[in-house]
Image (tube, grey):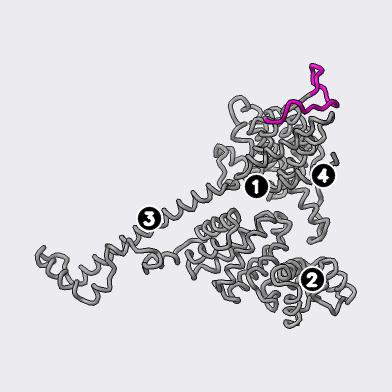
Amino acid sequence: MDEKVFRRRIIALLNKLTPDNIDVVSDDLIAWGDKSAQETDGRILRTLIELVVDKAVDEPKWIKAYTELCLRIISKTSDSVKDHNLRMVNGEYPSGGHLARKYLLQKCQGDFERGWKVTMPEAKQTDEFYEAVKIKRRGLGLVEFIGELYIADVLTVDIIKSCLRRLLSNIKTPEDEVLQSMMKLLATVGKKMDVPANKDEMDLYFSRIRSMTTNDLLDSRVRMLLMNSMELRQRKWQGRDSQEAPQTIAQLHEELERQKIAQANAKRLDAQSRWHKDSDSRRGRYGTVGRSSESRRNSEIQSAATPDALSSRNMFDALMDEDESPECASTKEQLTSEEIRAKVKTAIDKCISQQSDTQLVAAFKGIGETNYRTALSQTVDTIMDRRPDQVEQALGAVSALAKHNLLTEDAMTAVFAEYSDQLEDLVMDVPHALKFFGMLMAACGIPIARVSESLGKLATKVDVLRPPAMSVVSAYLKHAIKTDGEAQTQKVVEDAGFDVAQYLCADHRSDADIKKTLALQDLLCLFPKYA
C-alpha cells in the first residue's frame, strides 16, 4: 500500500480524536495498524505509532488521550502483525502488542537522544523564530509524554531514571532546555516515582538541583524554577495549578448543571438574607424593638399597609427567577475575574463540543452588562489557547456576540488594544497567536477603520522585517473574505481607504514590495491597484 495513502488516513483519524470518541477512533486506528499483518516489516504499525507520538508532543493538553490511545494499540494489536527485521532473545519475531510497544520505545528513545537544543533568533516573527519555538515546545511535550507513559506502566522506572540521569549530568553549565525538560519530567512522574524504593535516587536528583540553585552562572529565572521543583516535592507533588485535561461532553454537561445548582442556591440564600435584613430594618424604623409583643404586632400590621412596606421584598422573592428578581440580577455585578473566566470557559467548551453559537451569548447575559468587557477579554484569552480547529469553531460564537450588540465598538477596541500588548510574548507558547488574534477581531466585528486602534502599540512596530501587525491584519482580512465574500470585503477596504502599507516594514513599502506581500498572503484581490 502507498505510504502517502495510509499516512493521510491515519492523520485524518488522529485529528478527530477526542475523549468522547476515543473508543471508535482507536478501533479504526488499530484496524489500520493490523493491516501490517500483510507485511513483513510492520511498516503501517510503525508509522501509526510514530504519528501518535508526534501528535502527542505537539498537543500537550491532549497527552493523556494519546497515552490512552497507545495503551489500546498495545493491548489490541493483532498477534499476526510481525516484523521480520527484529528478533527477540528467544529468536522469534516480535508481534502484536509487544511489537507496538517496541516501536513506541524506539520512537521515544530516538527523539529523546536527538535532543531539542535550539538557539532562539533575536529577530522575532521570522520563520527561524517560529521553528525554534516549535522545537522547544516539542521537546517539553516529549518528556511529558514519556512521563505519562511511565505513569501508565508502558515505560519502566529504570527508563525514567536513565532520562533523569542524563538530564542532570551537567550541573555546572547546564543548558536551559535541558533544565526545563528535567523539571517537566520530574513534575510529571514525581508523585508515582517518589516512593521509599526510589528514595536514594530521588535524593540524589534533588541534591544536584539544590546545588544548581546557588550556581551564579545560571539565570535567576532558571534558579527560581529549580527552587519551585524543590518546593513541589515538599508539597508531596501537589501543584498549585494543575493543567486541565480535555473534558467529555457528558462532563461538561455535569459541570454546567453543578454550576447552575450552585448559582441558584447562592441566589436563594442571598435573597433570604436580604429579606431578613429588610425585615430588621423595618422593625427598627417603626420602633418595634423593646415593645411588648402585642404592641409590636400592632405596629407591624400598621406598617404592612404603608407604601414602604408594600414596596419591600418579601420571603417569596427568594423563589423568583433570575429574570424576575431585581436582587438576584444585582448579583451579576459582584463576579470576580476568575468566576467570569470559569463561566466563559464553560460556555466556549460547550460551543465547541456541541457546535452551537448560542452558549457564549447566554453566558454574557448571565454575567451581566457591567462585566462585558472583562468577559470579552477572558473570551479572547481562552480561545487563544485552543487548537486551530477549535478556534475556527469558536469564532461563530464570538460573531454571535457582535450580532446581539452586547458590546460597543469602543469597548471591543479597548479590549483588543489592551490584549495586544502581550501578543509577542504569547507567540512563544501559541505560534498561531497573531493569526488567531486577527480572526477574533474580524469575528467581533471590529470595523476596518479601527484596526490600527485595536492593535495598540503593535501597529507601530514596523522596524522588523516581518512586522507582527501585518500577520494580524492578514488574518483579519482573510476571515472577512471567508464570511462576507471577496467583493464585499474589497468594497469595505476601498470605502475605508485602508492603507495596508502602514503595517509593512518601514524599509519595504515600495509598490513592488507591497504587491509581493499581498500575493504571498492571497490578498491581492482586495487591493487591485497593486495587482
Q: CA gap, disc 1 to disc 4?
A: 28 Å
Q: Which quadrant is home to the N terminus?
A: top right
Q: Nearer the viewer, mark 4 or mark 3?
A: 4
Q: Which residue is mark 3?
A: 265
Ranked by sequence position, the earlier of labels 1 and 2 is 1
Callout 4–callout 2 Cβ contact below 8 Å: no
Q: Position of residue 218 (x, y in %)?
A: 73, 46
| Residue type beneath disc 4 | Val
Q: Which residue is mark 4?
A: 5
Q: Which quadrant is home to the C terminus?
A: bottom right
Q: Residue at x 59, y 28 (%)?
A: 195
**Element class at badge 1:** helix
Q: Nearer the viewer, mark 1 or mark 4?
A: 4
- Please state which of residues 147 and 441 is positioned toward the viewer in this rendering: 441
**Res 288 quadrant in image:** bottom left
**Element class at badge 3:** helix
Above or below, 256 relative to 418: above
**Element class at badge 2:** loop
Q: Which residue is mark 2?
A: 462
Crowdedness near tag 4: few (<14), some (14–19) or many (≥20) residues, C-alpha within 10 Å: few
| Residue type beneath disc 3 | Asn
Above or below, 64 relative to 157: below
Q: CA gap, disc 3 to disc 2?
A: 53 Å
Q: Residue at x 67, y 39 (%)?
A: 26
**Res 417 quadrant in image:** bottom right
| Residue type beneath disc 1 | Lys
